[in-house]
Image (cartoon, rainbow, N blue to C red):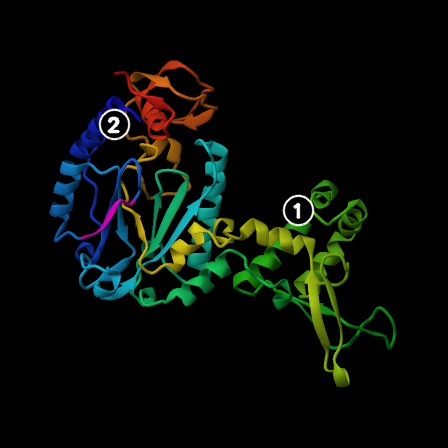
Amino acid sequence: MNTSTKIFLRSRFKEYYRKNRVPAPPGITRREFGFGTLESKIRARHRAFRNPAELEDFMKREAPFYISYSSAYYDFPANRPMSRKKWLGADLVFDLDMPMEFLNSERMDEVKREALNLVEFLKNDFGFSERDIEINFSGSKGYHLRIRNEEIRWLGREERREIVDYVSGNLEVKEFFRWDKAVTTSSGKGRSVNVIKGPRSSDKGWAGIIYSGLYNFIRDSGIKELEGVKGIGEKKAKEIYDNKERILREIELGRYNYIPEIVTISGSPTNAGQGFFIRNVSSPLVDRIIHEKAVKALASEDTDRMVTIDTSRLMRLPDSLHGGTGLKASIVRNIDEFNPLVDSIAFSDEEVEIELNKKVPEFDLNENRFGPFSGRVRIPEYCAIYLMLKGCGEAPG
C-alpha cells in the first residue's frame, strides 16, 4: 500500500470518528482494550480507560483501524502480564464467520441463519432473555454475540467448551434413541416386537428439535424432497412417502421403527433380557436435521470456536470500523431485518477513482454487485475504500 493510499484511508477513518460517537461497552473501567493497524488487527493491547469520555477522546484523536475490548473483566485491566490483571469473570461470547474471499450476499445470508440458530439455542435451551443477548455485525464476514449475565461470568474454559459442543451439534445420535423391552402388539396374536423409542413432542433441547424436525419434514415432503436427503434413495423415499400417515402416528407415540430406514440401530441383546447394547444409531434424516439446526461455524477446532472458550478474548468494539473492509461493526437491534452489506456502510457513495493492482472478481455491497474490475475504475467511495483495505487498489497520487 503506497503512502497516498494510507493518507487517504487515515483521513477517512478520522472523519468517521469525528462525526460518529462509538458507545463505550458496559463495565468500561474493568475492560482491557487493544488496537490495530493496517498490518495487524491487534498491534497493541493492555490499554484501559477511566470513563467513556476518555475512550471517545482517544477514538477521535487516534482513529484506529481496529479497536477491540476484552470479554473479561479485570481489577487491573492495564497490567501486564495477564496474570497481574486479576480476572473477575468474562462475558460469554461467540464469533460466527462465513469464509468468503470477497463480500457475497448469499454467504452473508448463510451466516445470518447461523446467528439466528444460535439465538434460538441461547433463548430456548439456556434460558437467556432478549436483553441478555447483544448482537453486532463483525464488520466483515459474520456476527459477534455477547451474553452479559452475571450468572455465567465465572464459567471456565471447559464449561464454555461444552456450550460450544452443544450448539454446534457435536452429538452422539444414539443418545436420543433406545431399544425398548419386548412388547405385545396387535399385529399378531401373542407376538411381540422390540420397539425403537425416541424423542417425543414434549421433549426439550436437541431431542425436541429432532422430533419436530423429523415430523415436519416427513409430513411436508414429497418423494423428490425425500430422495434429496443423502442416504435416502428412490426406493426408501417412496416407501416413506407411501406410509407417511402411519409413520407420523408412530412418531407421535415416540416409536421410530415402523420404517427401519428412518432410524436404524445396530447392537445385540444384553444378558438376562435386560434390553439391548446399542453399538450405533444411524439416520440420514436425523443427520440432516442436526446439520440444518447446528451452528456449524463453531463445529471445528478453529478460531471461531476458540473465541468462546477463551476467557480473555478481545472482541471488536461495536459501531467501530473494521480495518479490513471499511464497514461499521454495527449494533444489530433486529437481526431479521438487518442487512450488513447495506446497514453497515460507513462512507459516501461519491465516486472515487482508484488504480487496481490486481483483477477483482464480482462482489456485493450496498445492494449492488460490483466487478469484475481491472485497471483504473471510478466507483463509490465506500467501495473504493473496501478495495484499498483489501490491498487491491491504490488511491490517486
- Residue range corresponding to the magenta coloring: 42-47
Residue 278 placement: quadrant: bottom right
Q: Secondary structure at mark 2?
A: helix
Give the Cα distance between marks 2 and 1.
56 Å
Q: Of residues 151 and 120, which is closer to you in this image?
A: 151
**Label 2 vs 1, first from the N-terminus:** 2
Tag shown at residue 220: 1
Residue 307, x across and y down, in percent: 39, 54
Q: Is residue 46 magenta?
A: yes
- Residue depicted at x 71% and y 62%: 250
Q: Main secondary structure of the magenta part?
A: strand
Q: Is 14 placed above or below 394 here?
A: below
Q: Secondary structure at mark 1?
A: helix
Q: Of residues 143 and 113, which is closer to you in this image?
A: 143
Point out the frontmost of discs 2 and 1. 2
Q: Is residue 362 magenta?
A: no
Dot 1, crowdedness within 10 Å: few (<14), some or many (≥20)? few
Tag shown at residue 6: 2
Q: Of residues 267 and 372, which is closer to you in this image?
A: 372
- Residue depicted at x 46% and y 59%: 164
Dot 2, crowdedness within 10 Å: few (<14), some or many (≥20)? some
Horizontal side, residue 62 vs residue 158: left or right: left
Q: Please identify the quadrant where the N terminus is shown.
A: top left
Residue 328, x across and y down, in percent: 30, 36
- Residue depicted at x 17% and y 40%: 59
Kind of residue at disc 2: Lys
Tag shown at residue 378: none
